[in-house]
Amino acid sequence: MKQVIFILILVVMAGGLLFWLVENNEGSVLISTQNYVVQFSLWTALITALVAIMILRLTYAALRGLLAPGFRLVAGRKQRRQERWRKQNNRGLLAFAEGRWAAARQDLLKTADRLDEPGALISYVAAANAAAQDGEIGEALATLQRADGAVGTNNLAVGLTRARMFLDEEQYQQALQVLSLLRTNNIHHPYVLALLAQAYQSVGDWDQLEKLLPDLLGNKVVDKAQMFEYQVQIRSAQLQSLAQSQQSHEETLKQVEQLWSRTQKVVKADPVVLGQYVQTLESIGEGDVAETILRKAISKNWSNKLVLQYGDMDSSNPVQQLITAEKWLRAQPNNSDLLLVLGRLCKSNKLWGKGRDYLEASLRLQNRPETCAELAEMMTMLGEDEQSKQYFKRGLLTSLGLGKDQFGDELKAEPVQ
């Protein structure tokens, strides 16, 4: 009740204020054109404006009531069409997941242009991948070209799909072009970096791959173990490339030493890298230096791989090589690799009988074709042709994976003590 009384008081006060304004403010509104002049009192103009607004609102409401059913009908048809396109698109995605590539491409391409940008992008990329899986690389690239027109040429998903297809088809230069462009706008994107590393690795651009390593590690594309594998592969390949260089001896040696000086200690110690370094030095005429480096490395950290390489080195002092390897035998008496190396070094020094003993000891520890081949050659040097044939035969059977049990009678005749 109090609220009603309060409202009535406000209405009376407002009415009084309005009456006072009308009585004491006799303003006017003048509208003038070239041939006519119309003048209203201020309050007549205000009332006319209010009436006009009310008429416009009533007219709008009436028109809306009359036209709304038609608008709803059109909107309903559009919604039903979109629902049909959505269902067809879902069928295409399901066909893609099930590996029905032709059906997937058909449904996805029919609906891609009718969807908004996220849906269109997914459809184009899936259709392109379906074409690639079906072996239609040309159609896959054409589909990605259509996607460029629909969603823009700098789209990351489209670019990554295109780069991956180039890599799968071993079109590495094209992949590098796409990935280099993508990286300008996505410098820290992990998948862009991963594909770029794969491309550099495929074309053998080891210098660029080495420059990429900090970004790979910093963006968690690789862990420390994978980083080390990359470093080993890169440095080995770079050293091998220098070994095949056509430059002068001085220039090649300078580049080898520069490369080695900026190699991390842990990478230097890896048998693959160290072995390639020694091999590179030997190939450019630094055999004695290479022998010294390899001998010290083996004495410090034993490696069967490096020992085998030591036995193949063409040293200017093969006698000293043999003496060094025999010293290692004290600590590694049952090492078949070392015994094989000792046999080879004895052959280099024309110590046929001693070499045969080392090789036979190695063969007793491990039956492998290369030891049989060395023994066959050694028997030839000793004039024992029949035994040489037996070792050649044994080596052939071993290389074919045929063991002693299956061919026992034939192998028992071999002169293995």
Image: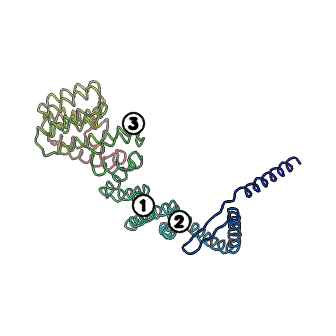
Q: Is residue 344 above or below residue 406?
A: above
In the image shown, does 347 or 247 lie closer to the viewer?
A: 247
Q: Quadrant of the C terminus?
A: top left
Is the residue marked by circle 2 packed among few (<14), some (14-19), or many (20+) residues within 10 Å? some
Q: Are circles 1 and 3 on residues that touch, CB within 8 Å?
A: no
In the image shown, does 61 or 45 lie closer to the viewer?
A: 45
Q: Earlier in the sequence, mark 3 or mark 2?
A: 2
Q: Earlier in the sequence, mark 1 or mark 3?
A: 1
Question: What's the residue type where badge 3 is placed?
Answer: Lys
Determine which quarter of the picture holds residue 324.
top left
Write down the residue under mark 3: 224
Q: Is residue 189 above or below residue 160?
A: above
Is the residue marked by circle 1 packed among few (<14), some (14-19), or many (20+) residues within 10 Å? few
Write down the residue under mark 2: 115
Residue 138 x/y as whole percent: 37, 67
Residue depicted at 27% across the width and 24% down the height: 330
Marks 2/1: CA–CA distance: 15 Å
Secondary element under disc 3, as helix, strand or loop, is helix
Q: Earlier in the sequence, mark 2 or mark 1?
A: 2
Secondary element under disc 2, as helix, strand or loop, is loop
Secondary element under disc 1, as helix, strand or loop, is loop
Question: What's the residue type where badge 2 is placed?
Answer: Leu
Write down the residue under mark 1: 152
Is the residue marked by circle 3 packed among few (<14), some (14-19), or many (20+) residues within 10 Å? few
